[in-house]
Amino acid sequence: MENSEKTKSGLCTAGLVLGIIGVCTSFIPIINNLSFFLGVLAVIFGLASIKRASKGKMIATVILGILAIIITLSAQQSLSDSLDALSEDLDTASGENTEQVLANDVDVVLGDFEVTTDEYGLSDTKLTVKVTNKTNETKSFNIQVEAVDVNGNRINQDYIYANNLTAGQSQDFDLFQFVSSNEIEAMQNATFNIVEASAY
């Protein structure tokens, strides 16, 4: 009987130590995977010694075990949320979330493709694009625009680099200013699309 009491008291002491280690390491990413199991063991050891160890020691063991579990789960959720937010920011900055950027961050209005020919037969071309920052903070935008023919084949492409547009600010950009003469007719009949948009 005495050995049984000693065993259960020893379990409680071991649980108390595991609970303390679990709480101390529960804030550390990756290592806190072990903290979760230490917390579970602390609770089990504490409950197993419920009738033999001192009441205060047993309660402390169980509480420390539960704290280790709760803090570990909370820390891992926070880390997961942070990584998700970082991933979303990287996708936004790399153009992976073009639809989201166009819906929430920037308004892009494509004008008409214009061709003017001077007296020497040289042609100037441009497609004016208006870019507006729809957010409440200063942002920069990279936008890729393509010209495609009736079959959906790309004729040409150009890029907009709108740097540090303040909240609500608009800026006009002239694209496709250097179009070869053999592409002009195709460009005049082309459809212009936004291929990719990123914000940072």
Image (cartoon, grey):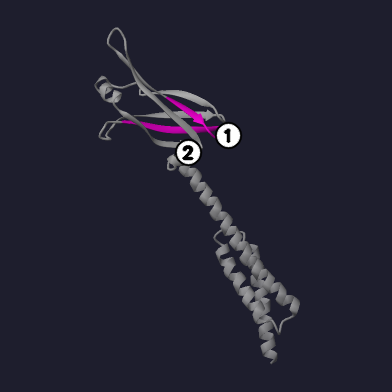
What segment is highlighted magenta in the picture?
Answer: 129-147
Asked whether the viewer can see residue 27, the reply is yes
Q: Which residue is mark 2?
A: 103
Contact flag, marks 1 and 2 (Cβ < 8 Å): no
- Residue that sits furthest to the top in the current view: 119
Could you say whether the residue bearing mark 2 is in a helix, strand or loop? helix
Residue 158: x and y, percent? 37, 28
* Quarter that holds the N terminus: bottom right
Residue 80: x and y, percent? 54, 55
Asked whether the viewer can see residue 28, the reply is no
Q: Which residue is mark 1?
A: 137
Position of residue 173 in the picture relative to residue 113 (left or right): right
Q: Residue at x 62, y 70 (%)?
A: 39
Q: Residue at x 61, y 59 (%)?
A: 74
Closest to the camera, between mark 1 and mark 2, is 2
Q: Report how far apart the C-alphas of labels 1 and 2 lie in the structure.
A: 16 Å
Amino acid type assigned to the residue bearing label 1 in the image: Glu
